[in-house]
């Protein structure tokens, strides 16, 4: 009988953690696991989740914004669902679902609780009291889990500094992606970009974390310096109107393309020559991983998560946050040194192929689930006969 594994995430927005969670759930070995996805409604990926060959549950009051009344109701909804469905393993993602889901699972008697940190609720630049409060919540939440997963070494070290571990075991499991062969992209034709143009891409939401106003400043300066340069900005969010206004006043608007949310990220990247990221904090930026998988060199701010995969002068350039002048300089350097840019792009793809393949990520999680379940004391929960579980194949065991 397969183990029922419930993955909980706050909302299925078009972001790295959400994509990662969908990719994690769908390919789980159905002989060993019976997955179900639990999320708040209203995300752009809801329909994609419903189309997956897995069960999905949308909790009506689970939402991103802090709302004391709705958050309590969401907790009760999660608790009742867990008591009814009785999963063997609950795996939570994101800050809100991570805390509410772990507490509900703990009180509902779920035997194995796992949480993945795709980043933290406390961030650089936060009000000190607010930040300390979020740190305390994460410390408290860590005590509710048997195991904590980090997607980057930077984040694991930050959790250690902040004493976010409880009594849980920990591991690093990279956020995997599907490694695809190069294909034909029609994005340039769609946008009217000449085939000989040099194209820079960036993918991410227009929210403070991704720092879109500095991104647009860099885009304006780079495009203004060379009429052969076009910039693709894929994403949306609260700061998009300000970003568009900045381009209208300071940049060549006909060569800076605001694309909104796109589901063809790989096609955008295949149409590009370089990637830029100005995030102020990250867990592990999926867009950067996909850029490297597409063979692009990158220019990115040196923040948590980025430091795990971007090697300065190896597969791109790592620069200090807010140094927009250096970002402009390095992007222009890549354009003017095409052979070096191709070498960096090839190095980035090689790194992704060895460490970030989605099949490897799924196998690591399956092995982890088996090991955690095997450690549950006999007859402690559900009267489950652990001897009925087949032995863990040697190929799936964590080393």
Image (cartoon, rainbow, N blue to C red):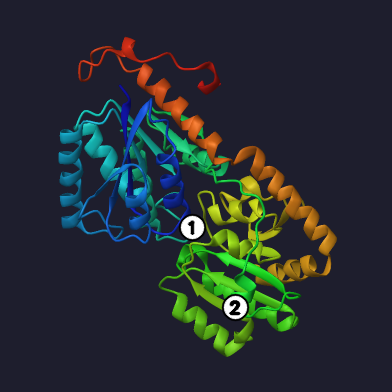
Between disc 1 and disc 2, whose residue precedes?
1
Of marks 1 and 2, the one in the foreground? 2
Residue lying at 42% horizontally and 38% vertically, measured from the top left: 164
Labels 1 and 2 touching (C-beta < 8 A) = no
Residue hosting label 1: 124
Residue at 51 percent across and 20 percent down: it is 397
Question: In the rendered image, which quarter contains the C terminus?
Answer: top right
| Quadrant of residue 325 within the rendered picture | bottom right
Task: Rate crowding at label 2 as few (under 14), some (14 to 19) or many (20 or more) other CA atoms within 10 Å.
Answer: few
Tag shown at residue 191: 2
What's the mark number on residue 36?
none
State the residue at coordinates (18%, 56%): 70
Question: In the rendered view, does 33 fall on the left or right side of 174?
Answer: left
Q: Element type at marker 1?
A: loop
Q: Position of residue 246 (x, y in %)?
A: 54, 84
> Does residue 385 appear in the picture of this structure?
yes
Q: Position of residue 321 (x, y in %)?
A: 61, 62
Q: Residue at x 71, y 44 (%)?
A: 350
Q: Nearer the viewer, residue 341 or 363?
A: 363
The secondary element bearing badge 2 is classed as helix
Q: Is residue 48 left or right of residue 80?
A: right
Quadrant where the N terminus lies? Answer: top left
Q: Position of residue 67 (x, y in %)?
A: 22, 59
| Residue at the limit of the structure toward the bottom, as seen here | 249
Q: Is residue 295 above or below residue 200?
A: above
Label 1, label 2: how far apart the Cα atoms are:
36 Å
Residue 393 is situated, as x and y percent measured from the top left of the image, at: 49, 17
Q: Is residue 171 above or below residue 394?
A: below
């Amino acid at each position: 009988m397969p183990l029922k594994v419930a993955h909980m995430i706050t909302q299925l927005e078009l972001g790295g953690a959400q994509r990662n969670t969908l990719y994690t759930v769908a390919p789980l070995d159905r002989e060993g696991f019976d997955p179900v996805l639990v999320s708040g409604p209203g995300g752009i990926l809801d329909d994609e989740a419903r189309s997956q060959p897995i069960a999905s549950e949308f909790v009506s009051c689970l939402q991103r914004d802090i709302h004391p009344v709705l958050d309590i109701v969401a907790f009760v909804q999660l608790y009742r669902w867990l008591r009814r469905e009785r999963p063997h393993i609950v795996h939570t993602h994101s800050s809100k679902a991570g805390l509410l889901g772990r507490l509900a699972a703990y009180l509902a008697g779920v035997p194995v609780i796992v949480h993945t940190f795709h980043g933290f609720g406390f961030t650089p630049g936060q009000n000190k009291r607010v930040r300390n409060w979020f740190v305390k919540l994460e410390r408290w939440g860590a005590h509710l889990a048997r195991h904590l997963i980090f997607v980057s070494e930077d984040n694991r070290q930050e959790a250690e500094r902040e004493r976010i571990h409880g009594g849980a075991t920990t591991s690093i499991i990279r956020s995997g992606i599907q490694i695809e062969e190069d294909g034909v992209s029609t994005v340039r034709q769609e946008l009217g970009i000449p085939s000989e143009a040099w194209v820079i891409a960036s993918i991410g939401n227009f929210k403070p974390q991704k720092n879109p106003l500095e991104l647009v400043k860099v885009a304006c300066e780079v495009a203004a310096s060379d009429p052969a340069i076009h910039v693709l900005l894929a994403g949306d969010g609260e700061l998009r109107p300000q970003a568009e206004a900045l381009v209208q006043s300071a940049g060549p608007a006909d060569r800076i393309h605001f694309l909104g949310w796109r589901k063809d990220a790989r096609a955008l990247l295949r149409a590009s020559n370089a990637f830029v990221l100005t995030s102020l904090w990250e867990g592990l930026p999926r867009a950067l991983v996909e850029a490297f998988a597409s063979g692009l060199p990158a220019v990115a701010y040196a923040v948590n998560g980025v430091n795990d995969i971007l090697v300065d002068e190896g597969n791109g350039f790592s620069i200090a946050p807010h140094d927009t002048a250096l970002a402009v300089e390095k992007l222009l350097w890549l354009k003017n040194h095409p052979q070096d840019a191709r070498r960096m792009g090839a190095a980035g793809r090689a790194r992704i192929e060895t460490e970030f393949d989605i099949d490897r990520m799924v196998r690591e999680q399956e092995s982890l689930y088996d090991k955690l379940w095997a450690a549950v004391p006999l007859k402690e929960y559900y009267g489950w006969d652990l001897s009925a579980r087949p032995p863990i194949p040697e190929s799936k065991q964590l080393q």
